Amino acid sequence: MSILKIQNLSKTYSNGVKALNDVSLEIPKGLFGLLGPNGAGKSTLMRTIATLQEADSGSIELNGLDVINDKMGVKRNLGYLPQEFGFHPKETAFSFLNHFCMLKGITDKSSRQELVESLLQRVNLWDARKQRLGTFSGGMKQRLGIAQALIGNPGLIIVDEPTAGLDPEERVRFHNLLSEIGENVVVLLSTHIVDDVSDLCPQMAIINKGEIVFTGNTGEAIDVMKAQIWEKPIEKTSLDEYRSRYHILSTRLFAGRHYIRIFQAESPGGDFIPVDAKLEDVYFKHLERGINNPVAG
Ligand code: ADP
């Protein structure tokens, strides 16, 4: 059963930018990745689901609630970690969460204290509970943001670009926390980082230029490209020549050399090496759809 059902959602900003173009999506239980480049429309979609802004047309249903017309009901069912949230640098983690609990209507002091303490433990910030937020690392801030999103036991948690700017160790820690939460709650993770989705999300969608260009099972999407990815180091100057002959998905630098990654069923021969398909290949292949068929307007 899908928890979140988005149908034909469109949004054009007053400057004429069409941020969402007829977006339809069903989010089932578990961790769901919404992957797309910067400017694809992810935040617009996240903010619309979180009732912070409105679409021009379309509908969103969360656990049977109409998101457009029942904002209060939806807010009770939803936790949201925005790309950036404001806090006072002199405030402590404890007082920050205590304040959010009050805003969410937990008026009884002792149950509030109990909840804040359990949240701090859950996101592994207990030892830092008296520390000022101004001294927190990026990863600690994000974990505090997740704690805030968990208040009230929402059925859906939305996290917008949560790992951008985290160092590798913090990222792993944050991934572990999200996957723990994803065991009980639906987590909608928006990101431009392919590895976030391949590490965490069994189900996913790719958004480009306001359109959903792929939705489905992450593992299956990779399997479809199995045994069709080939790689080879080339001279940078010959890139255009290769581009005209092969379906190049991506290029990368490794140890100072340029590598191309191509997609084709039959072996290209020469010194191309067969390599395992990755989610990145799926991503680049589907992004091309948006490039070849640009969104009208
Ligand atoms: P993403 O989160 O994928 O980076 P956004 O939803 O932030 O994408 O933006 C989608 C498009 O809408 C971009 O072209 C962006 O510049 C534009 N956009 C976002 N917010 C506004 C706004 N408030 N006014 C005008 N254009 C906006």
Image (cartoon, helix red, strand yellow):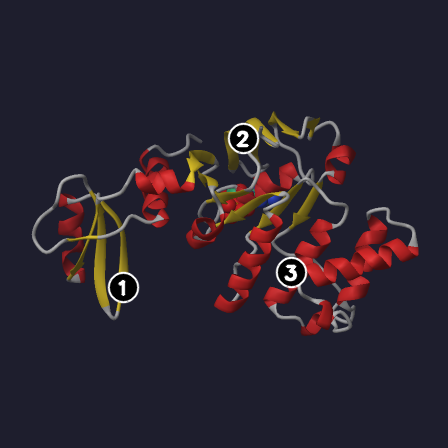
Most extreme residue toward the left is 270
Q: What crowding class fits label 3: few (fewer than 14 Cα within 10 Å), some (14-19), or many (20 or more)?
A: many
Which quarter of the figure is the C terminus placed in? Answer: top left
Q: Position of residue 283 (x, y in %)?
A: 37, 44
Q: Position of residue 100 (x, y in %)?
A: 80, 54
Dots 3, 1 in contact, CB < 8 A: no
Q: Which mark is residue 143?
A: 3
Q: Which mark is residue 253?
A: 1
| Left-right relation of 119 to 213 | right
Disc 2 target residue? 26
Labels 3 and 1: the sequence-earlier one: 3
Labels 2 and 1: the sequence-earlier one: 2
Give me the residue at 83% from left, 50% from top. Answer: 103
Which quarter of the figure is the N terminus placed in? Answer: top right
Residue type marked 3: Arg
Residue 235 falls in which quadrant of the image?
A: bottom left
Labels 3 and 2: the sequence-earlier one: 2
Front one among 231 and 236: 231
